[in-house]
Image: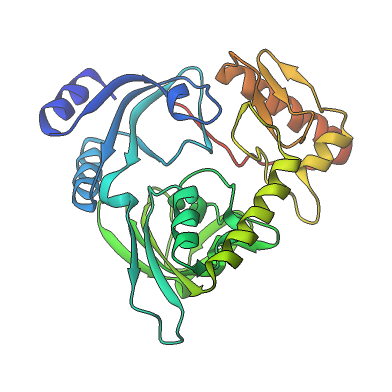
Amino acid sequence: MNALQREKLRSWWQGRILRDVSMADYSTLRAGGRADCLIDVTSLEELTALIKWLAAEGVAYYVVGRGSNILVAEQGYSGVVIRLQGDITAITPLPPSKTGEQVVRVGAGCSMAALVSWCTERGVSGLEFMTGIPGSVGGAVWMNAGAWGYAIGDRLKKIVLVDAAGCCRDVASSRLVLSYRKLGWQDGSLEKTIIVSADFLLFDDERSQISCRCREYLEQRRGKQPKGVASAGSFFKNPPDDSAGRLIDAAGLKGASEGGAMVSPVHANFIVNTGGATAADIIRLMQLIQKKVYGKFGINLEPEVKILQG
């Protein structure tokens, strides 16, 4: 993004623009380089208008949710980081489906924690397994996040996308291709598309039962994960029929560190910021893990965390 583009954006965009932003403040790793601009969009209309402008100007952009799966490299990001706020965080109950399920429409910017809490308070079941998973609904759908043998894609009815041209599309779940930590689309590539909202098929249950299941999932998660340190949650995707954490542990890497970044002694698939870690520290540690695991097992570990640069 050059100086002329920055000036044109400042003149055109009516909302607030943050310039030269440290992305460490917007990442759960509490590390990261700087971004040229950060913009909060609060409605679908704002989002489509912004994407059309950026596309016309040839300006790079990236959408972040709660910052749980992003790391901006040390050299920074010469583009616009977009956060989904306002109306794009709303939770709206819809009329039941033909088969009787409760349908809930959720804005992509809504946090998973807020959605699970909303469901619990209203006796709506089906997403308890997402308890304790950080990040936004959009990010969770994009990654087909899940735990305990369940995935969020199992509950999808449809999603609403904004494509690279700024056009809005409804995509039924029957047109989606869902696999481990991945969302695909039968009708084309999802590259440069933005998830705006998701409709979930859920069902009614006793609030006490939902709350009990949430507590059980949270207790299991807390017993296996590091506490009191910044992290991105699970850093690597599990390879088929194996566990990234097991492979990293077996490679003798628990407690390994680069600068302020360390492989958690509690769970080997967590890279934690022990204090003052830089993006370069985390990337070096990530590469060390990949090299050691490949050398020992012949398996390439793929990060869940998106490394943003350029």
Say above or below: 138 vs 18. below
Q: Quadrant of residue 94?
A: bottom left
Q: Is residue 2 visible?
A: yes
Report the residue that reaches farthest toward the front. Answer: 208
**Measured from the top left, where is residue 241 in percent x and y?**
80, 56
Q: Residue at x 57, y 65 (%)?
A: 208
Q: Is residue 164 visible?
A: no
- Horizontally, residue 109 falls left or right of residue 258, namely left
Count every numbered label the image shows and give the total: 0
- Horizontally, residue 114 falls left or right of residue 272, namely left
270 and 194: which is toward the camera: 270
Q: Which quadrant holds the N terminus? A: top left
57 and 87: which is toward the camera: 87
74 and 249: which is toward the camera: 249
- Horizontally, residue 36 falls left or right of residue 24, namely left
Report the residue that reaches farthest toward the bottom. Answer: 98
Q: Which quadrant holds the C terminus? A: top left
Say above or below: 141 vs 255. below
Q: Quadrant of residue 55?
A: top left
**Measured from the top left, where is residue 256 in percent x and y?**
79, 21
Q: Residue at x 47, y 72 (%)?
A: 201
**Measured from the top left, where is residue 222 in percent x and y?**
69, 42
Q: Residue at x 44, y 23 (%)?
A: 25
